[in-house]
Image: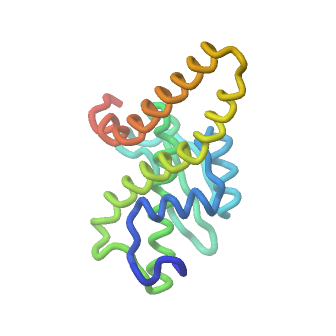
Amino acid sequence: MGRHIGAWPPTESVLAEEFVSSFNLVPSTPNGLQQLCVQLGISLSFSSLPAELRGFNCAYQDRMEIVLSEQQGFWGAQEHTLLHELREILERSFITLGYPTVGHVRELEGKAEDFARFTRMAAISKSLPTFFELAEQIERKWVQVAALVLIGCGALFYFYTCAMLPRFEGTAEW
């Protein structure tokens, strides 16, 4: 908040960049998601949920918990859902501090979706330079070029899936 109080509320992409920087977030596995939640002091569990519910968060006493559906239909959906739920928790903190970022609670769903997409994109963007540096160390030129092309194509595909995941989820047969 301190870095952006003069331009409050920040955009979801700014919040995502700050989140990735603050928690050294990289594209994650279920184990990595669990570690992130431990770092944040949030319980994370996986359960069989109704098809229309991909996850939810709740707070009780001094504890916060996120429950994610075990049956998420697309690669990256659990990470996306976790980040969505984290954004909703983050908004509660902003409200408690007197600096909400939404005018009405109905706006939060869309903002949480944007935050999840932007956070996943920021995390891979942070990792890309390392991948390119490793590829540049390959001695055989044609292998190096192939690796660079594969990294570039992989990154484009990843960005596409981040951007389109909510649409894929909306049309999926669960």
- 4 and 96: which one is in front? 4
Residue 136: image location, x then y, percent: 66, 29
Residue farthest bottom in this picture: 98
Residue 89 is left or right of residue 141, and the answer is left
Q: Is residue 130 above or below residue 22?
A: above
Residue 140: image location, x then y, percent: 69, 14
Colouring method of the image: rainbow
Residue 62: image location, x then y, percent: 63, 74
> Could you tell me which residue is drawn at 51 percent across and 46 percent down?
68
**Image quarter of the C terminus:** top left
- 124 and 112: which one is in front? 124
Q: Is residue 100 above or below residue 52?
A: below
Which quadrant of the figure has residue 107? bottom left
- 77 and 71: which one is in front? 77
> Could you tell me which residue is drawn at 63 percent across and 34 percent down?
131
Residue 126 is left or right of residue 103, and the answer is right
How many labels sit on residues? 0
Q: Is residue 8 above or below residue 36?
A: below
> Could you tell me which residue is drawn at 60 percent across and 74 percent down?
61
Residue 34: image location, x then y, percent: 66, 48
Which quadrant of the figure has residue 98? bottom left
